[in-house]
Image (cartoon, rainbow, N blue to C red):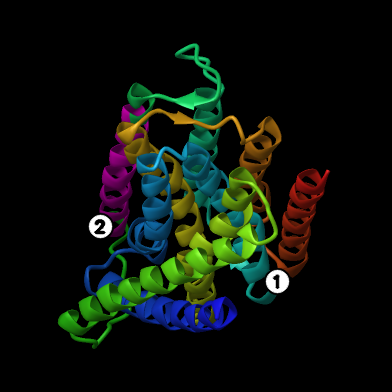
């Protein structure tokens, strides 16, 4: 029965992503917001809702390994897995404006999480305290404000002509809300049943959070990124991934740590290093102006290698 639910959930995720992206594009056109910002600030937040639910509930239940492991694993999967897979079929353009703010910020918050987790500030190893969480939430608020402020300013200065969209605003909103609801619901069923299957094989919570839960809660990002790329909106696909990674660290762990301090003894230094390295990858490809098919394949191979390492470590 679990396998049937997994298949049905995957179908729901695909359709939900298509509705979400279509509605987001329509809203972006009407309010003259760029594809990258709509991907980072709206689609990115929306597709990060499963991670928020899983990490928050993990904190409430006292299982903080799940809360942090879900975010670390999701961020690795988002870049190496999703962005790599998407680029293999639809080369992703990286513009200079992406190199100046969002991508460096994604690297910065990844480094900040590692510093906080290994306690350079509060003296408790592998712990995200409540004050640490408030710092992360402040970064989230600043990112949201500056993203829209900069996008409005640059659009006014350039006097951009945005392609007209004739979809009624109410219908676009319905698509976004309905698509997001379908995404989150389908993802919830997928994660619950994936964990049930994993438990039958006797694996621990840290491993499940870094792999199955992380990949499961990132399925909306995968579906939304591919749907955006198919619609020739690779900037939205890139914005979705970068935005989701920033939100995962700043908003999700910021809120979860307010429930209780997040101890993450099961998440190793190697996991954090891979997360930081993954955040740097778009910056490296940005100097060439795009992530091509070969680069995407290389990223995806790195993702497979990391998961192979996790599996072999679990079995040892």
Number of numbered discs present?
A: 2
Give the left or right position of residue 34, taking residue 248 as reference: left
Instruction: Give the residue displayed 48% in from the left and 35% down from the top.
Output: 109
Asked if residue 134 is positioned above or below residue 178 in the image, the reply reads above
Q: Quadrant of the N terminus?
A: bottom right
Q: Which is more N-terminal, label 2 or label 1?
A: 1
Asked if residue 290 is positioned above or below residue 311 in the image, the reply reads below
Residue 36: image x %, image y %?
Answer: 42, 61
Q: Which residue is mark 2?
A: 156
Which image quarter: residue 46? Answer: bottom left
Q: Which residue is mark 1?
A: 88
Q: Tell me if residue 152 is in the magenta stretch.
A: yes
Residue 104: image x %, image y %?
Answer: 52, 40
Which of the two residues, 110 or 295, is positioned nearer the viewer here?
110
Q: Name the outermost residue toward the left.
A: 170
Residue 150: image x %, image y %?
Answer: 31, 48
Asked if residue 24 can be seen in this view, the reply is no
Q: Residues within 10 Å of mark 2 (few under 14, many from 20)?
A: few
Which image quarter: residue 201? Answer: bottom right
Q: Tell me if residue 98 is in the magenta stretch.
A: no
Q: Residues within 10 Å of mark 1 (few under 14, many from 20)?
A: many
Q: Which residues are magenta?
A: 134-156
Secondary structure mostly taken by the magenta-highlighted segment of the chain: helix
């Amino acid at each position: 029965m679990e396998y049937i639910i997994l298949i049905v959930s995957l179908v729901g995720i695909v359709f939900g992503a298509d509705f979400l992206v279509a509605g987001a594009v329509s809203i972006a056109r009407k309010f003259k917001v760029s594809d990258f910002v709509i991907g980072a600030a709206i689609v990115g937040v929306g597709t990060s809702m499963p991670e928020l639910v899983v990490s928050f509930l993990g904190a409430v239940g006292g299982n903080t390994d799940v809360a942090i492991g879900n975010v670390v694993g999701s961020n690795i999967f988002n870049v190496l897995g999703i962005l790599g897979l998407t680029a293999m079929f639809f080369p992703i353009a990286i513009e200079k404006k992406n190199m100046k703010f969002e991508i460096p910020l994604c690297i910065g918050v990844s480094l900040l999480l590692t510093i906080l987790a290994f306690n350079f500030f509060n003296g408790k190893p592998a712990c995200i305290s409540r004050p640490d969480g408030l710092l992360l939430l402040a970064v989230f608020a600043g990112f949201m404000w500056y993203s829209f402020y900069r996008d409005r300013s640059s659009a006014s200065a350039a006097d951009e002509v945005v392609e007209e969209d004739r979809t009624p605003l109410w219908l676009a909103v319905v698509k976004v809300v309905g698509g997001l609801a379908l995404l989150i619901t389908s993802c919830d069923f997928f994660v619950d049943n994936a964990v049930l299957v994993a438990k039958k094989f006797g694996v621990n919570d840290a491993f499940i959070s870094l792999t199955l839960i992380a990949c499961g809660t990132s399925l909306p990002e995968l579906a939304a990124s591919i749907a955006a790329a198919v619609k020739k909106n690779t900037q939205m696909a890139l914005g979705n991934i970068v935005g989701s990674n920033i939100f995962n660290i700043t908003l999700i762990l910021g809120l979860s740590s307010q429930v209780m301090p997040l101890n993450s003894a099961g998440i190793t230094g190697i996991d954090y290093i891979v997360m930081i390295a993954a955040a740097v990858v778009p910056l490296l490809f940005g100097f060439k102006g795009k992530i091509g098919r070969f680069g995407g394949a290389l990223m995806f191979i790195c993702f497979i290698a990391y998961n192979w390492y996790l599996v072999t470590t679990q079995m040892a």
